[in-house]
Amino acid sequence: MAAGSDSVQLDKVSKTYDMGQVQVRALRDVELTIPAGEFAVFLGPSGSGKTTLMNIIGGLDSPTSGQVIVSGHDLTGLTEDQLTEYRRADVGFVFQFYNLVPTLTARENVQLIADLVNSPQDPVELLQSVGLGAHLEHFPSQLSGGEQQRVAIVRALVKRPKLLLADEPTGNLDQETSTEVLGVIHDMARRENTTVIMVTHDETIARDAGMIVRLLSGSVASIEGDRNSPPSG
Amino acid sequence: MAVSLLNVKLLRDIYQSRWQFIAVIVVVMLGISFYQSAWMSYRNIGASYELYYDMLRFADFEITLNEAPDTIGRRLRQVPGITSVQPRIVSEVELEMPVVDAREVVARIISLPDSGRAAVNDVTVLEGRYLGPAHKREVLVEQSFAEHHSLRVGDYVHPVVDGEVTDLRIVGLALSPEYIYAIQSKQYLMPTPSTFGAFWMRRGQAERLLGMSGMVNNVCGRAEERQRDRVMTTAHVMLGRYGAEEPVPREKQPSNYLLQMDLAGYRHMAVFFPLLFLVCASLTIYTLLVRIVNSQRGQIGFLRASGMSVQALTWHYLYYALLCGALGGLLGVIAGIYMSLALTRYYLSFLAIPVIHNPMHWPTVALGLAAGVFSCGIAGYFSSRRVALLDPAVALREEVAAVGRRPLIERLLPVLGRLSFYWRIPLRNIFRNRRRTLYTAAGIAMAVSLILVSLAIRDAMFDSIDTYIEEIQRYDLQAALIPAQTASVGFHVAQWPGVRKAETTLALPVELHRGERIVNTVLVGLEPGSHLQTLVSPEGRPVQVHGSAMLMSAANRKKLGVETGDVIRLAFALNDEETNIEAPVRVGEIIRQPVGSYVYLPAATVRRIFERDLGLPRGAVTTLMVLGEPDHLNMIKEKLYKVPNVAAVEDARETRAQLTEMLEMSMGFIVMMIMLGAGLALAIIYNTVSINIVERTRELASMRAMGMARRTVGMLITVENLLVGVLGLVGGIPLGYVLNQVMIASWENEIMQFQAVIFPASYLTTVIAIILTILLSQIPGIRQLNRVDLAAATKVTSG
Ligand SMILES: Nc1ncnc2c1ncn2[C@@H]1O[C@H](COP(=O)(O)OP(=O)(O)OP(=O)(O)O)[C@@H](O)[C@H]1O
Ligand SMILES: [Mg+2]
C-alpha cells in the first residue's frame, strides 16, 4: 500500500508549552510519515515528546506550528467539534492508566464506546476473542491489570478506528502479560488493517514493529525499518 | 440500546456513593420542606383567620357611640354599600372575683340579639351551649379568661353595677373574631386575662343589667370591600349626633391587628430561612459534584479522547444535580405539606380557633419544586462546566497527583515538623489538598452558622424579656394612679415593711408628629436617677433622661423618620375643643426598648409642658413603682390595691409570664427551625466528611496495606477531620454571627424589638453539636474503609 490517503503525515510539527517564565519545547520540527496499516513505535527517553506527539496525531492537542494530515485531512484547521468528530470516527486510544469506568462492567465499558459510532464491532465477540469471555460482566476492580488493559484495547478498537494510538499500554504490566497484550494489539490491528502508533520505553517491544521512530528532546533522531522513504525536504 | 450506558453509569455511580447522594437529597428536602411548610402555614393560618372571620361575620368596621336608640340599625342599613349592621351594647363593669390580691377585674359586657344570631361579630361556643331566652340570667365567657380563672360551665360570675352585685350563670365558653387575642384596647399590646374578660349576653339581659332600655352604644357593620371607606365615613357622619367616635376599621381592630403582625413576622421567617437553607443545599451539591467530577477526571479525559461530546458529558453530571433537586424537591414538598398542617394546627389550637382552612396552594408547591431543581441545577451547571473546561490531554497525563511536599506552614513553623506523627500526617493532608480542605471546612462552616442562627432566635427572644424585666423595668410592682397624685404617695409607700424602694413617674398618652407621620404612644416623665425604671442604649450602656431631649427606640425613630437632634411636635393624645397642648421637642439618643414603644422625658419637663393646662397637682405622678422583698410582694400588692386612686397594679412576674407565653406561640416554629437546622448541619457534615474518606479510599487503603493498623488510620482520619472541623468553626461562627445580625435587623415586630445576641450557651451547644456530628459522620466511612478489599482498592487506577 502506498503512502496514500490513509496515512499520517507530519510536516514541521512543533509544540511549545508556554509556562510563563519558561518555554518548554516539547516538539521541534517533527517530519514524519506513517503509512496506512503500519505498526509504528515511538521510542525515546522520558520527556522526549512521545505522548505530546501522539496526542497531536490523535487530535487531543494541537501543534504550535506545522501541519498534521491524517487520511488526507489537515487537522490543524479543525474546530473543537470537528476534532471531537475526528476522534470519534477515526481514532482509538489506549493509555497506560486504563481509565475504565469503574461502575460499568467490562462489556459495558466497551459498549459505551461502541455506542458512539454507527457500525461498531460486536463488543462481546471482541472481548471473547481476547480471552475475556468469562469476564464480560466483571467490574474493573474484579479484573487483573492485564485483563483491564485488554478491555481498554478492545474498547479502543470496537469503533473500527483507522488509527490506534497506544501510550505505554504495557507500562503497568509484567513481561508475560505485556507480551500477551501486545499480541492482542497486533492481531486485532492486522484484522482490521488499522494503523497503530505505540509509545514505549521498552526496546524489546519495538522489535516486532514495522517502523521505529526514535525521539530525542522533541526531535526525530532516527527512523528504522521504514519501508517508505521519508518525504524530501 | 434503550437506556444509554451513561445513564447506567449515573445510576451505578449514585448507588456507589448512595449515602452522600441521600445526604444531598436530605439537604434539599429540608430546605424545600422548610419553605413549603413555613410559607404554606403562613398562608393557611391567614386563610383560616379569614375563614373564621367570614363564618362569624367579623365586622369590617366598628363605631363607638355615647348612646343611641336601637333604630339606628335600620337607618344604617340604607347606606349604599353596607351589607349588614349590628347595633349593640358594649359596656365595661367591675367583676367581683374571689381572688386574694383583690385587684379590679374588668368585664366587658357585649350584647347579642335577643333572637337569632348576631348579624355581625357572632361568637362560637367552644364548650357548653349558646345563650337561652333573654329573660334567663345567662352569660358566655371568653375562653382564655375562663381558663385563666378556672371558670367552668355552670359556675356563676358576679358583675358589680352601680354598687350592686348580680349573679350570672355561665352557660358556655366562647370565642369571637374580636377576641382571638383578648385585648382590652389598642393601648395594651397583649392579652391580660387576669384583669380583663369579654362576656356575651342577650340584649334584653344587658339592657336590664346596665339600665339601657332600647338604647345601644356601639355599632358594627360589614360592607362591600370597595365601598367600605365611604360607608365608614357616611356612618360616622350619620351617627355624629350620638357622639360617634372615629370608626375603627378591621385592620385596626386590636385582636386582628396583633394577629396580622404575628403573621407578618412569620412571613419574614418563611422567606429568610428557607433561602438560607437552599443556598446551603446548593453549595453542598456544588461541592459534591465538583469532587465527583474531579475524581473522574481520567474517565472524562478518556471519554472525550474517544470522541464523546462535551455536551453529553456535561449533561451526565448535570443529571446528578437535577435528580437531587427533583427528588429532594418532591420529598420536601410532601414533607412540607404535612409539616404545614401540623404547624397550622398548633397555631390555631393555641388561639383556640375552631376552624382550619388548609387549601392546597399549588403555586407554592410548584415554586418549591422549582426551587429544588433550580438551586441544584445552578450548582450542577457550575460544577459540570468543569467537564468542558477540562483538557483531556492534561487529564490523561495525571494519575493521582499527590506530591509529597512539606507544607508551607511546616516550613514556616518548623516546630510543627517535630510534632508527633498523629498530628503531622493530618496536618500535611490538610495543607496538601487545600481545595478539599476548603470545601469540607466550608460545609462545616455552613452547618455551624445554621445551628447558631437557629439557636440565636431563641436567644434574642429571651434576651429581650430579660433585658426588659431585669434592666429596664426593674420594679416588682407598678400601680397606676387615676387621677394623678402628688409624689408624696411614693414617700408613703416607701415606708411600708418589705418595700425596698418606691419611685414615681408621670405618664401621659401622647401623639408625636413629624410632618405627615404620627406615632401614638405613652410619654413617661422619669425622675432623674430613677432606679426602678432605667433606660439603656442599644449597646447596653445606661442612659439618663436630660433637658428636653426625648429618648425613644430605633423603631419609633424609624416610624417618624427622625434622627438625633431633629425636632418633632409633641401633642396630648386627648386634645379636644377645651384642651390643646402641644410643644416642640428635640429627639435625643436612641434607647433600647425590647417591649413596647414608650418615649421618655425628664418628669420636670413633662410637668412644665402639661401641668398647668391639664390642671395637674404640683409634682404630679401617675404611676408608682415598687421594689420589694420577694416574700412580701403578695402582701404589698394587696396593700397597694387599698391605696386610694390605685386603678391597677402590674406584677412584673406576671408580665414575664405573659411575654413568655406569647413567645411560646412562636416556639413551635423555632423548634422546627432548630431541628431542621440541625438536620441540615448533620447532612452537610456527613456529606463532606464521608466523601473526604471515600475520595481517599485508595490512599488510605494503601496506608493500611503498608502495615498501618486500622486503629491508627482511624485515628489519623479523626484528627484530620477534627482539625478541619476547627477550621469550619472558625469560619462558621463569624458567618453565623453576621447572618444573625442580618436576620434580626430585618425582623420587625411592633410589640417586641429584638437585638442580635447569641448566648454563650448557644456557642457551646453549637461547638459540641458540630464536633459530635463530625465524629458520628465519619463512622460509616471508617467502617467501610475497614471492610475494603485492600487488593481491589489499590488496583483500580482509573480513579
Ligand atoms: N501541559 C504541559 N505543560 C507544560 N509542559 C508540558 C506539558 N505536557 C508536557 N510537557 C512537557 O513536554 C515535554 C514532553 O512531554 P511528553 O509527555 O510528551 O514526554 P514523553 O516522551 O511522553 O515522556 P514519558 O516517557 O515520561 O511519558 C516534557 O518536557 C514535559 O514536561
Ligand atoms: Mg508519555
Image (tube, grey):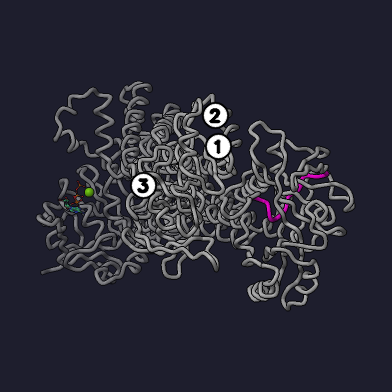
Residue B177 part of the magenta segment: yes
Q: Read off the chain for label 2.
A: B
Q: Viewer-nearest of labels 1 and 3?
A: 1
Q: For this rendering, which residue is in front, B496 or A89?
A: B496
Q: Where A133 falls versus B390 (above or below)?
A: above
Q: Position of residue B773 (x, y in %)?
A: 44, 33
Residue B538's tag is: 3
Q: Position of residue B690 (x, y in %)?
A: 42, 37
Query: What residue is shown with label 1?
Result: B651
Q: For this rendering, which residue is in front, B124 or B498?
A: B498
Q: Which residues are magenta?
A: B171-181
Q: Quadrant of the C terminus of chain B?
A: top left
Q: Where B128 falls versus B86 (above or below)?
A: above
Q: Where B374 falls versus B169 (above or below)?
A: below
Q: Position of residue B37 (x, y in %)?
A: 59, 51
The residue at 25%/38% (across/down) is B431
Q: Read off the chain for label 1.
A: B
**Residue type, mark 3 in image:** Pro
Mark 2 secondary-structure assignment: helix
Q: Viewer-nearest of labels 3 and 2?
A: 2
Q: Position of residue B386 (x, y in %)?
A: 35, 56
Query: What residue is shown with label 2?
Result: B633
> Quadrant location of residue B470?
top left
